[in-house]
Amino acid sequence: MRKLCFNLVLVMFCVGVSTSSFGQFNRSHIKKNNKRIATFTGKKHFGREHVYTGIGFSVNALNYYGDLSPLPSKFSTDISFTKPGIGISVFHRFGPRYTLIGQFMYGTLKGADSESAKTSGSDNYNYRKERNLSFRNRIKELSVVAVFDLFENDGTYISRVKWTPYVFAGFAAFLHNPQAQAPATYLDGTPDPKAGQWVNLQPLGTEGQHSNLSSTDVNYGIKPYSLLQVAIPFGVGARFRLNEVFDLWADIGFRYTFTDYLDDVSKNYVDLNKIQDPLAQALSYRSNEVPNPGLPTHSATITVNGNPTTVQLVNGYGSEYKTNNRGNAKNNDIYMVTSLKLTYILGATFHRAKFR
């Protein structure tokens, strides 16, 4: 009996110790877990388990830099010829700072000597006024650019930064088609049946691209330019978080192209007798449309539609000579795109959440 009582006391003591130890362990575990919850920020670390994708729509403003700009500088443009454009895009975010964007953009470039020659009395004004060339070009651009954020975002799309500046650069391919409005008459005074219509300039060869030029001609060897071109887009901007899934992007970007023919102007005037199409002749030389030209003229015999006719050409324009420049072949054309873009985040993929 005494032995039985002793055993019961021993068992009760062991159970009490075990219960006390388990309680202490459980309280410690709960305390540690509560501490983790208290410090949880809701952010996840970037990695393979965390990426997100989105779509965007942009409204754009396009400006042209080239041979029909107000000043003979690659940084000169005429703001009055700012033209609208639209774009749709898809983007994919890879890390705390990096995003890749694919975009299709449609927009128009435009320029005209008659409007851009604004500094009366200067040599540049006189040259552009008498040249009197003009164009429009509708651009269809497909681009891929990499975006680098200046402010790092190491969280999910829900906890992304409120705003960040960024820089971008990439590659673009675009279709273009320079056009001009046909004049009222050909150079011999014959009415032009296409007067006032926008006509494609590349097939006409206004600088002798489709003509049989001799080896002594200054534009000898000239080839028709391609309507498919490539460009290097680059620029800066800022992105602003509107809510959990919408962002507003604002940026200014330049497209450095590898063509000088966005405006159909690059090299020298060609002998108008080498151009067979009367419309091509009239669009190659438009100084005859300027009232009261301020430069001296000379008489020249030009065959228009097979009929020789005597016309007055402004000296230095419309005739074949090495210094009779129609454009500046040393500088390729550039266009600028100012963009305001609204993007929507489609979602994210998470393999697991991580506490901090």
Image (tube, helix red, strand yellow):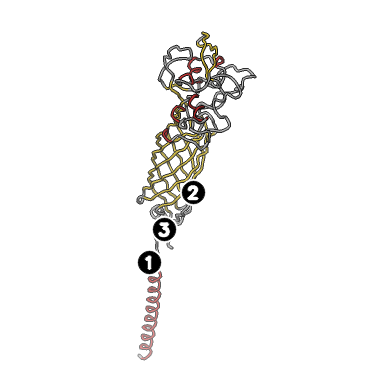
The residue positioned farthest toward the right in the image shown:
215
Asked whether 139 or 192 is in front, the reply is 192
What's the residue type where badge 2 is placed? Phe
- Mark 3 to mark 1: distance in Å? 13 Å
The C terminus lies in which quarter of the figure? bottom left
Q: Which residue is mark 1?
A: 38
| Numbered disc 1: secondary structure | helix
What's the residue type where badge 1 is placed? Ala
- Mark 1 to mark 2: distance in Å? 33 Å
Q: Position of residue 235 (x, y in %)?
A: 48, 43
| Above/below status of 238 relative to 68 | below
Q: Position of residue 196 (x, y in %)?
A: 40, 20
Q: Position of residue 56 (x, y in %)?
A: 39, 42
- Asked if disc 1 and disc 2 are in contact, CB closer than 8 Å, the reply is no
Asked whether 194 or 26 is in front, the reply is 194
Asked whether 93 or 286 is in front, the reply is 286
Q: Which residue is mark 2?
A: 148
Q: Earlier in the sequence, mark 1 or mark 2?
A: 1
Which quadrant of the structure image shows residue 156?
A: bottom left
| Above/below status of 28 relative to 56 | below
| Numbered disc 3: secondary structure | loop
Q: Nearer the viewer, mark 3 or mark 2?
A: 2
Which quadrant of the structure image shows residue 41?
A: bottom left
Q: Residue at x 35, y 51 (%)?
A: 243
Give the label on residue 43, or none. Answer: 3
The N terminus lies in which quarter of the figure? bottom left
| Above/below status of 252 relative to 353 | above
Q: Residues within 10 Å of mark 3 (few under 14, many from 20)?
A: some
Q: Residue at x 39, y 55 (%)?
A: 159
- Mark 3 to mark 2: distance in Å? 21 Å
Q: Residues within 10 Å of mark 2 (few under 14, many from 20)?
A: many
What's the residue type where badge 3 is placed? Lys
